[in-house]
Image: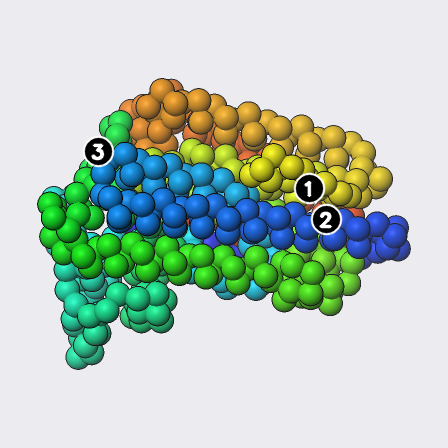
């Protein structure tokens, strides 16, 4: 059973006093915007490389070209995951994010699935096994959906989250991931999805409906580029996201930055993406569940939080975007808090690296969370613990900066574990 619960964790902070911050908060907010602009630009450029690799695959559906497209997808995740620290504080990002990174998904909406592992129906989702690729006409109660032509518009405007079901994910990175890897049928054993390249062949088609599968993969990747272009433009000078920040007071802007960091650190990453899967020992709760790339995505989520705090981001070309960061403000007000948070950010990165190192041995996230895998469970729990500890220090940083009341995202898996099943 897929669980996706978020609770608000309200932090009571001291009264606002922004006078000390007036001369430096604007520069920190400027660096924050510069990092967002660079990271979304990198996400866009790597998505374009992904599209070129997919075009090569469709031109010549060989295993080598499928491997190259899969690697391009993994590469594209590196800058994108580092943007997630901009989500929760910025409404413009949070409302858009579901178009590109929504999960978990009921992949039977998109293509063929294994009935033994996936099942045949869902009480909650009428389109659980709709298989758009095999069926140009879909029935949703008394409604008929014409999916004859698979276009970006069909995916974005008709199919994505159709029937107001969050798991009807038709767009974004994870839809592409499923189309490149197929289902991971290994449970908590080693191994990722194993879709054959011939699923895209017009002469040696496997899986059926190869022409429509090709259309879907091309359309969904084109749409990803369009969506990323929108957000990259939002963070350019004069863009909507920059304007939203500029319209806020210094304290409001800093609350936006810190609430994004803290909510990703605690409720989303430590809770929904990591602890939940560990509690349930369920590979269905794995973020990049088809490719077994979850360890990398989690690592770069944590990296994104650290980037924002330090005011620096290393671009995919190796260049560095750097400027005044939150760390500078916190250090001026409470040097001990800054030192502690920096130390805990490093501890989280080290714990994440431990998970990455395990993955290099074949012990990917789904293997580590398996029931009975005591050592693997401990590796994952250490990540949860370090993320939780750094969130407590993010709270202390908020207090040190006297920013007023800030609300962070919570998670039942951390706050009310007895309710999770």
Mark 3 vs 1, N-terminal side: 3
Place of residue 368 in the rendered image (x, y in percent of width and height, measured from the top left): 35, 28
- Residue drawn at x 21%, y 33% is 186
Question: Regarding mark 1 in the picture, which secondary structure is present there?
Answer: strand
How dense is the environment of label 2, judged by Cα within 10 Å: few (below 14), some, or many (20 and up)?
Answer: many
* Residue 4 visible in image: no
Disc 3: which residue: 186
Place of residue 101 in the rendered image (x, y in percent of width and height, measured from the top left): 42, 53
**Cα distance between the residues tagged 2 and 3:** 43 Å
Image vertical order of residue 145 relative to residue 77, above or below:
below
Image vertical order of residue 329 relative to residue 292, above or below:
below
Q: Quadrant of residue 135?
A: bottom left
- Residue drawn at x 88%, y 52% is 23
Q: Residue furthest front?
A: 59
Place of residue 324 in the rendered image (x, y in percent of width and height, measured from the top left): 77, 43
Question: Regarding mark 3 in the picture, which secondary structure is present there?
Answer: loop
- The residue lying toward the viewer, choosing from 221 and 412, is 221
The image's colour scheme reads rainbow
**Cα distance between the residues tagged 3 and 1:** 41 Å
Disc 2: which residue: 31
Badge 2 vs badge 1, beta-carbon distance below 8 Å = yes
Q: Is residue 255 left or right of residue 300?
A: right
Question: Regarding mark 2 in the picture, which secondary structure is present there?
Answer: helix
How dense is the environment of label 1, judged by Cα within 10 Å: few (below 14), some, or many (20 and up)?
Answer: some
Mark 2 vs 1, N-terminal side: 2
How dense is the environment of label 3, judged by Cα within 10 Å: few (below 14), some, or many (20 and up)?
Answer: some
Mark whose residue sits in front, 3 or 1: 1
Disc 1: which residue: 321
* Residue 27 visible in image: yes
Q: Residue furthest bottom?
A: 142
Mark whose residue sits in front, 2 or 1: 1
**Cα distance between the residues tagged 2 and 1:** 8 Å
């Amino acid at each position: 059973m897929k669980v996706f619960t978020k609770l608000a964790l309200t932090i009571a902070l001291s009264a606002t006093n922004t006078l000390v911050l007036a001369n430096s908060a604007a520069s920190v907010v400027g660096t924050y915007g510069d990092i967002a602009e660079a990271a979304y630009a990198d996400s866009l450029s790597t998505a374009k490389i992904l599209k070129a690799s997919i075009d090569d695959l469709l031109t010549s559906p060989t295993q080598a070209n499928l491997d190259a497209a899969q690697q391009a997808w993994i590469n594209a995740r590196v800058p994108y995951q580092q943007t997630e620290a901009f989500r929760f504080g910025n409404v413009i990002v949070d409302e858009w994010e579901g178009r590109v990174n929504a999960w978990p998904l009921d992949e039977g909406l998109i293509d063929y699935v294994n009935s033994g592992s996936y099942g045949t129906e869902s009480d909650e989702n009428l389109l659980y096994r709709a298989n758009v690729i095999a069926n140009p006409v879909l029935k949703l109660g008394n409604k008929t959906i014409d999916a004859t032509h698979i276009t970006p518009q069909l995916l974005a405007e008709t199919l994505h989250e159709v029937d107001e079901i969050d798991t009807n994910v038709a767009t974004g990175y994870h839809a592409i991931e499923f189309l490149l890897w197929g289902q991971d049928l290994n449970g908590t054993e080693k191994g990722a999805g194993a879709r054959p390249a011939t699923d895209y062949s017009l002469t040696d088609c496997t899986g059926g409906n190869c022409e429509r599968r090709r259309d879907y993969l091309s359309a969904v990747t084109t749409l990803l580029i369009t969506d990323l272009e929108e957000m990259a433009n939002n963070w350019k000078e004069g863009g909507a996201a920059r304007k939203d920040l500029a319209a806020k007071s210094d304290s409001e802007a800093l609350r936006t930055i810190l609430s994004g960091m803290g909510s990703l650190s605690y409720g989303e990453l430590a809770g929904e993406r990591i602890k939940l899967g560990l509690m349930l020992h369920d590979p269905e709760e794995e973020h990049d569940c088809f490719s077994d790339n979850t360890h990398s995505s989690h690592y770069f989520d944590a990296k994104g939080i650290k980037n924002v705090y330090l005011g620096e981001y290393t671009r995919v070309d190796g260049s560095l975007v750097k400027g005044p960061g939150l760390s500078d403000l916190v250090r001026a007000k409470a040097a001990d808090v800054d030192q502690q948070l920096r130390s805990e950010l490093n501890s989280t990165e080290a714990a994440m690296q431990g998970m990455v190192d395990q993955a290099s041995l074949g012990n990917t996230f789904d293997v580590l969370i398996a029931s009975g895998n005591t050592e693997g469970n401990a590796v994952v729990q250490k990540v949860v613990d370090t993320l939780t500890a750094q969130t407590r220090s993010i709270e202390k940083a908020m207090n040190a900066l006297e920013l007023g009341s800030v609300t962070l995202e919570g998670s039942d898996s951390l706050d009310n574990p007895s309710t999770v099943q």
